[in-house]
Image (tube, rainbow, N blue to C red):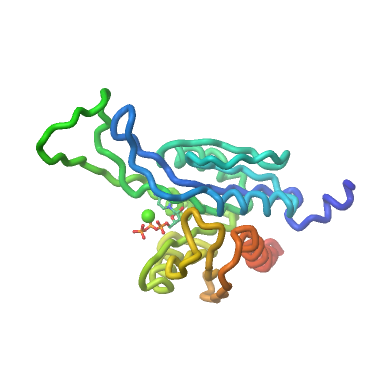
Amino acid sequence: DKVLKEKAPLYGKKVLITAGPTHEPIDPVRFIGNHSSGKMGFELALRAADLGAEVILVSGPTHLKVSNAQISLVPVVTAQDMYEAVHEYYSDADIAILAAAVADYRPAQVAGEKIKKHTAAMTINLEPTRDILASLGEQKKNQFLVGFALETNNELENARKKLSKKNLDAIVLNSLRDEGAGFGKPTNKITFIDKQGEEVSFSLKSKTEVAADIFNEILLRFDVKEN
Ligand code: CTP
Ligand code: CA
């Protein structure tokens, strides 16, 4: 049994994964969020564990549960929480995959009390959150760093731009053009793009299968990098 374990392709490796949405508070009872279910990130964590890795799964609010001895779940709420948690684990990671749907903006002020309704229109001022993935790209040493790109138009062009701008080793383009793909759905349609510009397109599949495809592509390139 031990021998089998040591033969697993990611035995002894540490994989850091982000998943889910973030919630940015407006007042004590309200927040800005998005429709991410966390499923893609959780499937990636399970796949990494199956491949023998030790997994840190930093996840925003989700209903998903995980019980796997190799996966440590680090629950977070806001983009800032996620930023801090990810930076705690990044220096030890061999592979980092950022699949979370992080809020790009948060309310500039959080009201201490529940905001009361009035008849007039109201405005909430937003300020940008920090880009977690870009910050990891800046600090990258030997980690194999993978991002996601969620696009509805100019998909490949936008994904390629994110790959180079954020200093990634690869990016997974998540195509929302397909009916069955994306938030809350059990399936995704992806294109894996590496930093050499190689692009591998996959058909619409379950997120479990998509996670396996992503790790197959990573392993092809990660081995090259290690030797
Ligand atoms: N990401 C992140 N921190 C943020 C925003 C995004 O780590 N504050 C990561 C996501 O987890 C994903 C990648 O960056 O891996 C791309 O996210 P996406 O929303 O597609 O792109 P953005 O760079 O935020 O640009 P835009 O939303 O304008 O397309
Ligand atoms: Ca974004």
Q: Residue at x 57, y 52 (%)?
A: 96
Q: Residue at x 88, y 46 (%)?
A: 2
Q: Give whichever of 220, 102 is nearer the camera.
A: 102
- Image: 196 above or below 14: below
**Quadrant of the image containing the C terminus:** bottom right
Name the quadrant containing residue 210: bottom right
Q: Is residue 1 left or right of residue 80?
A: right
Q: How many dots with numbers?
A: 0
Q: Is residue 171 left or right of residue 105?
A: right
Q: Give whichever of 84, 61 is nearer the camera.
A: 61
Q: Residue furthest left?
A: 120
Name the quadrant containing residue 143: bottom right
Q: Residue furthest top?
A: 113
- Image: 119 above or below 38: above
- Residue 95 position, x and y percent, is 61, 54
Q: Residue at x 61, y 40 (%)?
A: 65
- Residue 121 position, x and y percent, is 12, 41
Name the quadrant containing residue 77: top left
Q: Residue at x 34, y 45 (%)?
A: 129
Q: Quadrant of ligand 2?
A: bottom left
- Residue 81 position, x and y percent, is 44, 36
- Residue 209 position, x and y percent, is 65, 62
Q: Is residue 144 left or right of residue 36?
A: right
